[in-house]
Image (cartoon, grey):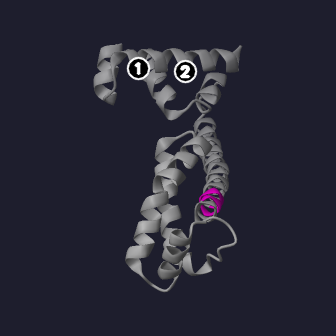
Amino acid sequence: MEAAELEEVQRAIQGDDSALAELLQRHYAFVYKYLVKVTMDPNVAEETVQDTMIRCMENIHRYDGSSAFSSWMITIATRIYIDKTRRRRREQIWLEAVRNQAVRKLRWQFESRNEEWTDVMDAMTRLTPEHRIAVLLKHYYGYGYDEMGEMLGIPSGTAKSRTAYGLRQLRKELG
């Protein structure tokens, strides 16, 4: 690490907010570009780099100089991203369990009223909401793609592609 940067880090550790701001600004683009490559999603990268900057500000006193300042920041950024990824996975598992419970309850309600729960209904539960909505609007309620696009605030071509994808998935499930 350069002597000037080391001096700036020392000032930041001692509470010099302008030195800390300068350090973070200087390394922001580097960390962001790294995170774009890691996440492959500029929005996730931006969110993660913001969290990284906050964590660096909160923990500047823990920086010991054993590695480059940029390496320290990359380490923090990586750990934050991994933690977020794990959290998202746990949330997805939880949401899937909630969704499955809701589907079981809906199926029970159908069957308790002597209404038929078909394989198609079962397959529909596995479509994403966007695809399920498109299939229902087109093939159950009979709307045209232009109307669907207007209702959903999307281009009619997107409505058409969502419908086609949903039908393809249903055919796979039922085929």
Residue at 41% over, 67% down: 22
Residue 112 position within the rendered picture, expressed as x and y whole percent measured from the top left:
62, 40
Q: Compute the Cα span from label 2 to label 1.
A: 12 Å
Judge whether residue 137 is colored magenta: no
Residue 14 position within the rendered picture, expressed as x and y whole percent measured from the top left:
49, 86
Residue at 50% over, 26% down: 131
Residue at 47% over, 16% down: 161
Quadrant into which the N terminus falls: bottom right
What residue did someone put label 1 on?
A: 158
What residue did someone put label 2 on?
A: 166
Give the vertical position of 147 relative to 5 (above or below): above
Q: Residues within 10 Å of mark 2 (few under 14, many from 20)?
A: many
Q: Earlier in the sequence, mark 2 or mark 1?
A: 1
Q: Amino acid at mark 1?
A: Thr
Residue at the far front: name it: 3
Q: Is residue 113 left or right of residue 151?
A: right
In magenta, the rendered stretch is 74-79
